[in-house]
Amino acid sequence: MTRNSLKSAKIGSHIFIWVLIVFTLFPIYVVITSSFNPTGSLATSSLIPKIWSLDNYKVLFNNPAVPYLTWVKNSVILAVANAIISVFVGTASAFAFSRMRFKGRKLGLQALLLVQVFPSFLALAAIYVMMERVYTVFPAIGLGSLGGLLLIYLGGSMGVNAWLLKGYIDTIPLELDEAARIDGASSFQVFWIIFFPLAAPVLAVTALLSFIGTFNEFVLASLFLQDVHSRTVAVGLQQFVGQQFGQNWGPFAAGSLLAAIPLVILFLSLQRFIIGGLTQGATKG
Amino acid sequence: MYRLAGFTGLKAQIFKIAFMSIIDALLIWMFFASMAKEDSSTLSAVIATIFLLTNLVYFAKFTLPLKFLLPGLILLVAFVVVPVVYTVQMSGYQYKTGNEISKTDALPQIQANGLVLDDLAPTFDLVLGKVDGKWAALLTSQIDQSVLLSTEEKSTVLPAGSFTADEFGIARQADGFEPITEDFAANNEESIINLRFPYKDASFISPQGLDIAAVLTQTLVYDKDADTFTDTLNGVLYKDNGRGNYAAESDPSITLTPGWRAWNAFENYTKLFSDPNVRGPFIGVFIWTVSFAVISVMMMFFVGLLLAVILNQKIALRRFYRSILILPYAIPSFMSILIWAGMFNRQFGAINALFGTQIDFFNSPTLAKMVILIVNLWLGFPYFYLISSGALQSIPSELEEAASIDGANGRQIMGKIKLPLILQILSPLLIASFAFNFNNFNIIYLLTGGGPTNVLEGQTAGATDILITYTYKTAFGSQEQNLGLASAISMVIFFIVGSISLWSLRRSKVLETM
């Protein structure tokens, strides 16, 4: 390769990267400036705001028609509960698949592998009718309730989580549990005392991925949660900005920014583990 | 040493029994609550099964793996497998607006719709009571003050003097007739509304409240043996058309409401491929779904891989670039999509402000599609950068050295050695990503809502609708809700995504190494 072509390749690379950076940052810039733009509408928003104020943030906390904090609370409850329960239950299943030999194990694994490629909302019409029926008997876990939505999420995340976690448990050396067994530990003790602490980092990452996934989920949440006070952030903000794109843009931008910042910080600080988890599950599956 | 963990022996036993008692109590309560309701036998059966399984698995000794698997299994079966099975079942029914209930529920409603108030017959003042412990009524005609004593079997005219009337001439008491108390009436409103006292032929007297009754004529008469309805006013015969409605024999387009969900086997599927009103939009949506998924994955992969190649070299500010460029992956995607939707807004959007234009991106099918692809690229390239970067680093450097010793230049090493290897490593992920985008509901629904849709031309699908958003519109649309057809489309998606995934798994040989 000649000197010249090497140089032009380098310049080309830099141009490419800077174009991509502008592309990446543009919406982020827009949402930050809009959130501080006091007029609250898109109409007068120029690309460089002239006045800065916190009016849009005040709408989120003072306007009873926009129960932003309730939405955040609902999202956090759903996401945390789903993350903890699904990781716990998923680890138990993954442990059985990884460490025990039983009839139907291979078939079970194959079924699990197939199930996890389907998003649970594919059967949305059926889920809707089913949960409508459940509602008539148990309103607390039927259509319109956070409890019912949580159950659907739990079912949907079982396949992926069990599969990811099994991949990890497979990498924990067998000698560890053999040693424990020789010392007289039962399967439950091996699981609870040896595996849980060992797998803690991976469990945290799986829980985090689960958390982000639930936080982002829109289809089922919008189908399920019709009442304004039971909405999640995703459904709440969508309905809010969807009514009047021009009118509610400023508060929407503020609300998005507030909800996104903790997640972005969490993601960036844990990115090494998350990416490790992604590629591990991927190259194995 | 395990005793130190505090979770053995007696303590563990007590904990287990306490925990199981709570679960059992909950399940038993749920079972009886469910049994108490009508129409919930399936739910009761599910709860009973869960109850039996949990107790069997956790108290028997032979089921060790199941002790670990059961909670996950129950959740998976109840909330993933059951809905899928239910989808299969629903796809075989004519199940849409107007045909939502079962036939047993529809029959009484049709009959109730066939009731007509008889204008020529008198209205009656009503005193409700019992004769020999059975419902009866003293009815005083508001026209000629004649009095009827009716039971549900027969009505007899009472001659004057055989009853006691009040100052308004309304009969209050008669031999063998015991009036009911107001409390009793209030507690039995439901059965009172359904009382029918014989009048003439197809007409009967029906309470319209607690002290008034009117004559109703059943104009639609149900023949149980022939399963037909006859309209007594014009003699039209309505027959079960096998598609969830009673249709007039002379003109099948006239049907009685409500309909019911009727079994129609594969009709929803054949509709997808033969009914022009359904096939047209379905095929259009299908083509766009596939092209959207393929183009998206290709664009993301191209940008991501190029970025990985560049950032894998030692260039200045590498870490800084990297942390900025993975931001789209860290921001919750529903927010990014809504933000982009605002930015492409015609009047107020930042894009139009930037270029000083007034382009209506979401009103042109081509522009709307381009917007979707651009936004999807923004959302997806960081992920592809991350996985390409991982794949690049996993290629042993000896390969590169050996090739350069043999005289290959940088471009040759990239094109002939690295790229094929990367493609091989990443192909399962590329396929998974295709499957994900195939069902990428959020980007379509939140960005364009599937539009633009030409409602004037009666289009049911928008220009940017993909199969999953089209399913959603079919099932929960504002005009008509067709759950049967929506389930059939769901099944088509299941089939496509399932086969692609199976094929990909076969290729990667995961299935054999389990």
Image (cartoon, coloured by chain):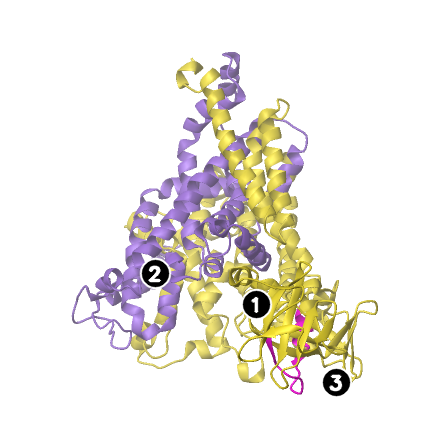
Chain colours: A purple, B yellow
Mark 1, Cα crowd under 10 Å, few <14 / some 14-19 / many 20+, is many
- Between disc 3 and disc 1, whose residue precedes? 3
Disc 3: which residue: B233
Q: Residue at x 42, y 59 (%)?
A: B379
Q: Secondary structure at mark 1?
A: helix
Q: Are marks 3 and 1 on the same chain?
A: yes
Q: Is residue B76 magenta?
A: no
Q: Is residue B336 visible?
A: no
How many numbered circles are shown? 3
Quadrant of the rendering where the N terminus of chain B is positioned:
top left
Q: Residue at x 63, y 75 (%)?
A: B139
Quadrant housing residue A101: top right
Q: Observer-nearest residue: B183 or A56?
A: B183
Q: Secondary structure at mark 3?
A: loop
Disc 2: which residue: A24
Viewer-side label of 1, 2: 1
Q: Viewed as shown, does residue A108 lie left or right of A183?
A: right
Q: Are marks 1 and 2 on the same chain?
A: no
Kind of residue at badge 1 = Tyr
Percent x, y of residue B438:
56, 60
Mark 2, Cα crowd under 10 Å, few <14 / some 14-19 / many 20+, is some
Mark 3, Cα crowd under 10 Å, few <14 / some 14-19 / many 20+, is few
- Chain letter of mark 1 equals B
- Chain letter of mark 3 equals B
Q: Secondary structure at mark 2?
A: helix
Percent x, y of residue B244:
72, 69
Percent x, y of residue B254:
72, 81
Kind of residue at badge 3 = Leu
Viewer-side label of 3, 2: 3
* Marks 3/2: CA–CA distance: 72 Å
Disc 1: which residue: B470
Residue bounds of the magenta highlight: B109-125
